[in-house]
Image: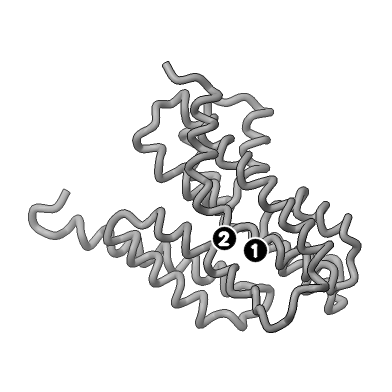
Amino acid sequence: MPSFRTHMIDGARTTLPLLPGIAPFGFIAGIAAVDAGLPASVAVAMSALIFAGASQLAAISLMAAGAAPLVVLATILVINLRFAMYSASLAPHFGHLGALKKMLAGYLLVDQCYALSIVRYGTLPPEAKFPFYLGVGAAIWPAWVGSTLAGALLGASVPDAWSLEFTMPLVFLSMLVASVRDWPMLVAALTGGVVTTLAHGMPLKLGIITGALSGITAGVVAGALRRRRPGST
């Protein structure tokens, strides 16, 4: 039978196509931190400890604007609420794990790690799920932290004309393509994307949560309508 290490390697290998999109995203995070007046060491520590790109960039933006610490923490909490939904989805697969493994899984829980893992869990045996997930996280973590360090150290020399901000949507688009498997998921993805775009100006970055909830609702409705059709299962 395949070993723990084999399943980890499988997870890491599955992640490789996403790394070219993650690296520029981390590079931008490093540049933003230095532009906000943070030392490179703090930028790297944020990437290693927070390990959540969207909330990290929001926190840097708020700190640069002189926001109160409570506002920064509240914004991070709001943006990261989606991880509660991810955790609930993963709970049936990780419920048998010990406390330390669950804590490690929680630390590594980012959008890419969840999306790649949950798509494969339908075909993986129970003993392969955690090592596969760990392999995905083990590939993403150094790419994210290393690219943040590179951005913090080299960002000042990057011309403004390069407009690297476009890489952030590409990271999420790559996840979207990998996870959309049926009509309700497509409806959820399109609805969430449109609503998030329209709600971009909402305070405390609530547009992200609004888009997520709208997408979930639309997907549930689309699934219910499909099941009502004659001959559907």
Q: Residues within 10 Å of mark 2 (few under 14, many from 20)?
A: some
* Location of residue 49 in the rendering, given as x and y in whole percent from the top left corner: 77, 49
Q: Locate residue 34 relative to residue 146 in the image: left or right.
A: right
Q: 110 or 6, which is in the foreground?
A: 6
In the figure, 130 relative to 187: above or below? above
Q: Residue at x 50, y 82 (%)?
A: 198
Residue at (63, 39) in percent of width and height: 138
Kindly check if marks 2 and 1 are in contact, taking CB atoms under 8 A apart as contact: yes
| Residue 45 x/y as whole percent | 83, 52
Residue type for callout 1? Pro
Q: Position of residue 194 (x, y in %)?
A: 44, 77
Between residue 42 and residue 232, name the one nearer to us: 42
Residue occupying the far top of the picture: 1
Tag 2 residue: 21
Q: Residue 24: which numbered mark, if any?
A: 1
User: Residue 187's image quarter?
Assistant: bottom left
The kind of residue tagged 2 is Gly
Q: State whether residue 20 is above or below residue 36.
A: above
Label 1 residue SS: helix
The part of the image, by quadrant, that contains residue 180 is bottom left
Q: Left or right of 109: which side holds 155?
A: right
* Residue 165 in the image, given as x and y percentages of width and height: 64, 74
Q: How many marks?
A: 2
- The residue depicted at 14 percent of the width and 53 percent of the height is 232
- Using residue 232 as the reference point, say whether residue 104 is left or right of it: right
Residue pictured at 51% horizontal, 37% vertical: 11
How far apart marks 2 and 1 lie (CA) works out to: 6 Å
